[in-house]
Image (cartoon, helix red, strand yellow):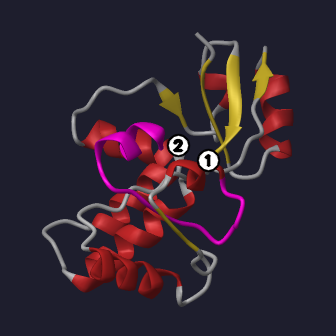
Amino acid sequence: MSCFARLTRTIVADPAPLAPAQVRAHIRTAVPLIADPGYVPSLERLCEEHGVGAVLPLTDLDIEVLAVAREEAAPLDGALGAVAAATYDKYEAHLLLQELGLPRRPRSSARRPDAVEYPVMIKPAALRRRSIHLAKDAAQARFFIDYVEEPRWCSGR
């Protein structure tokens, strides 16, 4: 945030009055929580009021909500919301990168723990979840697959 504030006028919109990003902002304002139906309209009002040229989410929570809102406001070629949703899930992001022919780390479906080389890391599919476990063999992988909600795994190498 400090870098942005040195280069341009910054506005931080956060429901938390003590949000760290607000320290260097030129304008600080509270907005509803992301699940609130007034969240996107409040950001739109701020953008209009201050002539905002870009909205940069500082957490992964906003990306899909803002992409869907943008798509609804001005439909584009391609599905912006669907791309955002795919990148929110590690395995779906892997499939999207593969489909687009872009570089990616090898990943596999959690349905085949006997078809990989060990060790592997078992982790939840959604980026916002923080539960990662090392499995040294198929038995450990099956245990952690059952333990972790919506798991995906990738090579530990």
Q: Residue at x 58, y 56 (%)?
A: 22
Question: Residue 43 appears in which quarter of the rendering?
Answer: bottom left
Number of numbered discs on residues: 2
Magenta-highlighted residues: 1-19
Task: Please tell me which residue lies in front, 52 or 103.
Answer: 52
Please provide percent x and percent y for residue 27. 46, 65
Q: Residue furthest top?
A: 157
Please provide percent x and percent y for residue 78. 19, 65
Classify mark 1: residues with Cα within 10 Å, few (<14), some (14-19) or many (20+).
many
Task: Please tell me which residue lies in front, 107 or 93.
Answer: 93
Question: Seen in the image, is 79 located left or right of residue 63?
Answer: left
Question: Seen in the image, is 58 located left or right of residue 20?
Answer: left
Looking at the image, is 7 positioned above or below residue 141? below
Q: Residue at x 64, y 41 (%)?
A: 111
Amino acid type of the residue tagged 2 in the rendering: Lys
Q: Which SS class for mark 1? A: loop
Task: Please tell me which residue lies in front, 44 or 121.
Answer: 44
Q: Is residue 23 magenta-colored?
A: no
Residues at marks 2 and 1, CA–CA distance in whole angstroms: 5 Å
Q: Residue at x 70, y 67 (%)?
A: 17
Residue for badge 2: 90
Amino acid type of the residue tagged 1 in the rendering: Ala
- Disc with the residue nearer the chain's start (2 vs 1): 2
Question: Residue 147 appears in which quarter of the rendering?
Answer: top right
Task: Please tell me which residue lies in front, 82 or 26.
Answer: 26
Please provide percent x and percent y for residue 94. 42, 39
Mark linked to residue 125:
1
Question: Seen in the image, is 42 located left or right of residue 141?
Answer: left
Q: Are marks 2 and 1 in contact (CB under 8 Å)?
A: yes
